[in-house]
Amino acid sequence: MKNFIKNGDTLTFVATADIVAGAGFLLNANGFFAVNSYDVVTGQSGEARVKGVFSLPKTVANAPDQFATAYWNDTTKRVTTTATGNTKIGVFAKAAVNGDAVADVKLLPAV
């Protein structure tokens, strides 16, 4: 197919801040969430994963069920079950308990 570019698991971006490998972040103001592939500094091009299941920092007090909606709190840089003021990024791939510092999240496509 002549018009195929790539599978879309990763996208190239220009960092607006320093971002470490494995960090979740919003690619734009529309809530397009990604997980950084390698350390980048402000102004540098990077590759970020936009598909897959990732272990992300979680709001410790949350205890999400498996497949509950996962939201990104861009202030705390943690995944949460709280929708208000946060960005929907996917679903919890497995249940997590109160006290867990991380949770597995399946990213869902941003529209």
Image (cartoon, rainbow, N blue to C red):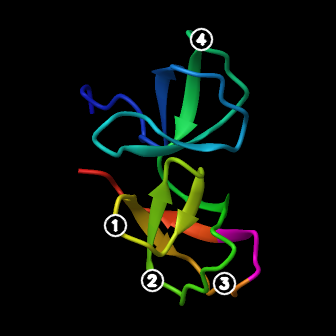
Q: Is residue 3 left or right of residue 6?
A: left
Q: Amino acid at mark 4?
A: Gln
Q: Is the residue marked by circle 4 packed among few (<14), some (14-19), or many (20+) residues within 10 Å?
A: few
Q: Which residue is mark 3?
A: 96
Secondary structure at numbered mark 1:
loop
Q: Which residues are magenta?
A: 99-103
The answer to whether residue 68 is magenta is no
* Residue drawn at (70%, 85%) of the image: 98
Label 4 secondary element? loop
- What residue is disc 2 on? 68
Quarter of the rendering containing residue 21 = top right
- The answer to whether marks 4 and 3 mark residues whose Cβ atoms lie closer than 8 Å is no
Q: Position of residue 109 (x, y in %)?
A: 34, 55
**Disc 3: CA contacts within 10 A as few (<14), some (14-19) or many (>=20):** some
| 76 to 44, vertically: above or below | below
**Residue 52 in the image, given as x and y percentages of width and height:** 54, 58
